[in-house]
Each structure stands twice: as C-alpha cells, then as structure tokens.
Image (cartoon, grey):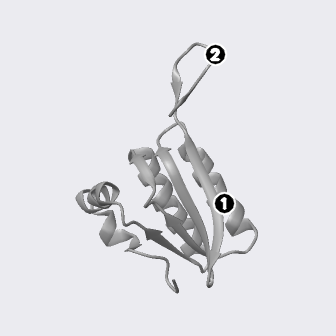
Amino acid sequence: MRGTSGDGAAEPELGLSLSEVGEYAVISVTGEIDMYTAPQLREAVRQLSSEGRMRVAIDLTPTEFCDSTGLGVLIGARRRLSDAGGSLVVVCANPRIRKLLDLTGLDKVLDVREAVPGE
C-alpha cells in the first residue's frame, strides 16, 4: 500500500534490504522502482561500491514494478561496478519483471539469473 503526501497524492514505496550471500552483497528490492524511488537504489549501489564491495546482486524477485528509470539504474550500476573491476548480477525469478528485461534486451546486457550465485 502506498503512503500519501501532504497533498493526498500517492507516494511510491520502495523497500531495500541488504544481505550477504557468499561473495555478494545482495540488495533485495520490494515495491516499485520508478522515477521517484530509483535514486534510492542508485544510492545503495553507490554506497556499496564506495565501501569496496564490488560483487553486488540486485534481487528484483519481490519487485512489483520497474519503469525505464529503474532499468537505467541497473545499467548504471553495472557500468559503475564493471569500471571499478566488480560485477553486478540481477536476480529475477519474477515473471513480469523478467519479461520486461527480455523485451528490452537487457537480459543480453545484464547478468540475469534465477538466484544469487553461491546460493
């Protein structure tokens, strides 16, 4: 359920939780990744890379919605980590989000898997 702002408009909700699986820092994303919430995900990846954590997995399995801004964050995260010698894995067992990745061709650009490597 979305919250409301002072003017009564619905605010998108995004939940980010961090865990460790083997060598990967895993960001699990719940809710919606859109132009309002994407900066939170971008900042989470930036923070991990600034801490020297170069193997990152973004788990989109619990994600309800992702727009082009969210897709841009995934591409930017891949570039940031790759440029620093790291890697990004996008975990997606969600058929709707997986279809989005397939239709946009990002399944060919991003390392998309059903589970975090090492699980």
Spot occupied by residue 111 in the image (x, y as percentages of width and height): 41, 74
Under mark 2, the amino acid is Gly
User: What is the residue that sits farthest to the right in this orientation?
Assistant: 51
Spot occupied by residue 62 in the image (x, y as percentages of width and height): 45, 56
User: What is the residue that sits farthest to the top in this orientation?
Assistant: 7
Residue that appears at 33% across and 63% down: 106
Whether residue 33 is situated above or below residue 60 in the rendered picture: above
Label number found at residue 100: none
In this view, the residue in front, 12 or 70, is 12
- Nearest to the eye among marks 1 and 2: give it: 2
Disc 2: which residue: 6
Q: Residues within 10 Å of mark 2 (few under 14, many from 20)?
A: few
Residue that appears at 39% across and 66% down: 92
Whether residue 22 is situated above or below residue 4 in the rendered picture: below
Spot occupied by residue 59 in the image (x, y as percentages of width and height): 49, 64
Whether residue 13 is situated above or below residue 7 in the rendered picture: below
Disc 1: which residue: 46
Mark 1 and mark 2 residues within 8 Å of each other at the beta carbon: no
Residue that appears at 59% across and 49% down: 15
Under mark 1, the amino acid is Arg
**SS at badge 1:** helix
Spatial distance from mark 1 to mark 2, Cα to Cα?
A: 30 Å
Residue that appears at 50% across and 54% down: 73
